[in-house]
Structures are given as C-alpha cells and as structure tokens.
Image: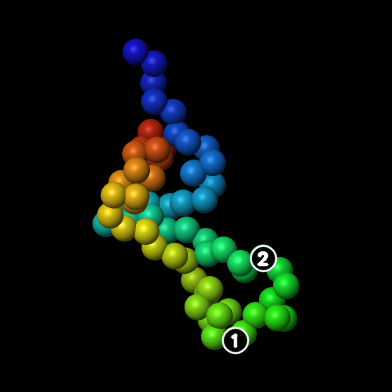
C-alpha cells in the first residue's frame, strides 16, 4: 500500500487550526486597490476561516504533513 501524500497546492494555501478549522488568505487583495471601497478592503483584511465538511476535506488532504 503506497503512502498518502500531502497535497502540495493545499499546503501552500491553507493552515489547519487547533480546533480543526481551515485558515486561508482572502481573494481580491493582490492589486488594483484604489478602486475598491474602504469597507470592502476592511472586510478583506485578515484570514478567512472555513468550517464543517469542507474544512475536514482540506485537513484530510494535508494530514500526512501534520
């Protein structure tokens, strides 16, 4: 039986918290910030959090590296 490998694309994009949630960087923060409103930019600050079954699938893809 071969070993399960860590999904390298997900490893670069997600981190698993101690409680099992997945943290990720929010989209639309890269460039062209001048046309985005202050409210929108404020909402894009910090990390996004994924919970539930999607977070479990992400954790399973990252499991060998944890």
Helix, strand or loop at label 2? It is loop
Which numbered dot is residue 3? none
Residue 50: x percent and y percent? 37, 59
Tell which residue pokes out farthest to the top in this image: 1
Residue at x-position 34% and y-position 13%: 1
Assess disc 2: are there few (<14), some (14-19) or many (≥20) residues with their C-alpha within 10 Å of its C-alpha. Answer: few
Residue 17 can be seen, yes or no? no
Rendered view: 55 above or below 60: below
Residue at x-position 34% and y-position 39%: 60
Residue 63: x percent and y percent? 36, 38
- Where on the picture, by quarter, is residue 4? top left
Rendered view: 3 above or below 66: above
Helix, strand or loop at label 1? It is helix
Residue at x-position 38% and y-position 33%: 64
Query: In the shown orientation, is residue 59 left or right of residue 36?
Result: left
Taking depth in this image into account, of 3 and 40 the one nearest to the observer is 40
Assess disc 1: are there few (<14), some (14-19) or many (≥20) residues with their C-alpha within 10 Å of its C-alpha. Answer: few
Query: In the shown orientation, is residue 13 left or right of residue 57?
Result: right
Mark-to-mark CA distance, 1 and 2: 15 Å
Taking depth in this image into account, of 25 and 64 the one nearest to the observer is 25
- Where on the picture, by quarter, is residue 48? bottom left
Give the mark nearer the N terminus: 1 vs 2: 2
Which numbered dot is residue 30? 2
Which residue bears the numbered disc 1?
Answer: 38
Rendered view: 34 above or below 28: below
Residue 57 can be seen, yes or no? yes
Q: In this figure, what is the number of numbered marks?
A: 2
Residue 26: x percent and y percent? 52, 64
- The answer to whether the residues at label 1 and label 2 have Cβ atoms under 8 Å apart is no
Quadrant housing the C terminus: top left
Residue at x-position 54% and y-position 85%: 39
């Amino acid at each position: 039986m071969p070993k399960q490998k860590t999904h390298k694309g997900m490893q670069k994009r997600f981190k698993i918290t101690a409680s099992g949630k997945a943290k990720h960087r929010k989209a639309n923060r890269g460039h062209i910030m001048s046309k985005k409103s202050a409210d929108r930019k404020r909402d894009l600050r910090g990390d996004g959090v994924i919970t539930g079954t999607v977070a479990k699938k992400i954790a399973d893809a990252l499991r060998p590296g944890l």
